[in-house]
Amino acid sequence: MKECINYKKNNDSTLKCEACNHFCLIQEGKVGVCGIRQNQNGKLYLLAYGKAVAAQIDPVEKKPLFHFLPGAKVFSFGTVGCNFRCLNCQNHDISQMFENKGNINDYDKIFWGRKLSPAEIVDAAIANNCVGIAYTYNEPTVWMEYALDTMKLAKEKSLKNIWVSNGYMSVQTREMIEPYLDAINIDIKSYDPDFYRRITGATLKPVLDNCRYFAKQSNVWLEITTLIIPTLSDQEEMLNGLVKFIKKELGADVPWHVSAFSGSISWRLQNLPDTQPESVNKVYEIGKKAGLDYVYTGNLWQNGQENTYCPKCGELIIERRGYDIIRYDRQGKCGVCNHNLAGIFL
């Protein structure tokens, strides 16, 4: 455990967590929505500090980030817990651990991961020739103290820091991590506020606000992901609204990844069918017709829609076959027209 740095004490003995936009008021002995930030004797503690439930080497494309150091390896890790309750969650065994496996009071008994200190994570990244560290698998906002300590050490060793996030971090958290953050993929699950309330247990506006900030007011590289769920996030009107938001509010050069839903591995939407390829292809076309420069069809690996093409002349710049890539660019420039691609390239 470690005492949290992002909370305030109230006069009624409750603690106000300020890690995310839930701003949970937590009573003695209780935890916030995330399940891992607990009030113990008037102090807020992160129960998951130093406890990684998943850790491995990944291609950066798996985050997914297609315009941030393509072809690089990153050390990925995450803990348990989440500030969302996404019914479609495919990592629910860790994000919704206490819903699935037991009570918060049994945390140490049911934790099945491994102890990894921030220093050990940084050392592992260096030993495996990784360019950086990805904070992923569950929402890093809820374990931001663990993440932040790691990010600071990583920056000292010239490693990059990448967050894979639902975008629900508070302004306070955002200000703390921004000096050490290099890239972020934010999941905009829908452009419908009602979807957020019903399916995630959160609200849409803070997600959009954080996307705007990273796109327009920071040096952090941003990419967006949207999961296409049959009957829930596949409505053309909603998707047109989302595309307009990305183009107008974030920029046409912000990459948009659209991916297919798999009902069989979801948390509580197993009654829904898998997303068909033609549905994802339709969304791809919506993005391209609206004028987005970089649209990718997530986890289908078909039709060349994972490739990067020059938005100026149409030349193939980066060819992707699964997570293997072939680069034809010159350090981020088109080899034909010399156009600068959006992103961070070496």
Image: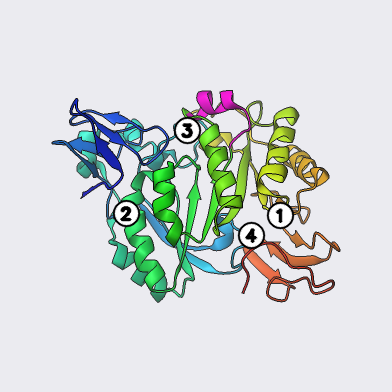
Residue 56: which quarter of the image? Answer: bottom left
Q: Residues within 10 Å of mark 1 (few under 14, many from 20)?
A: some
The local secondary structure at tag 2 comes to: helix
| Residue 1 picture location, percent across and down | 21, 49
Foreground residue among 218 and 119: 218
Nearer the N terminus, badge 1 or badge 2?
A: 2
Residue at mark 1 to residue at mark 2: CA–CA distance: 32 Å
Mark-to-mark CA distance, 2 and 3? 26 Å
Viewer-nearest of discs 4 and 1: 1
Judged from the image, the secondary structure of the residue bearing numbered disc 1 is loop
Pointer 1 residue:
253
Label 2: which residue? 146
Q: Is residue 242 left or right of residue 51?
A: right
- Residue 190 magenta-highlighted: yes
Point out the tag, 2 or 4, that comes first from the N-terminus. 4
Question: Label 4's element?
Answer: loop
Question: x and y percent of residue 237 in the render?
Answer: 74, 28
Image position of 183 with respect to 286: above or below: below
Disc 3: which residue: 267
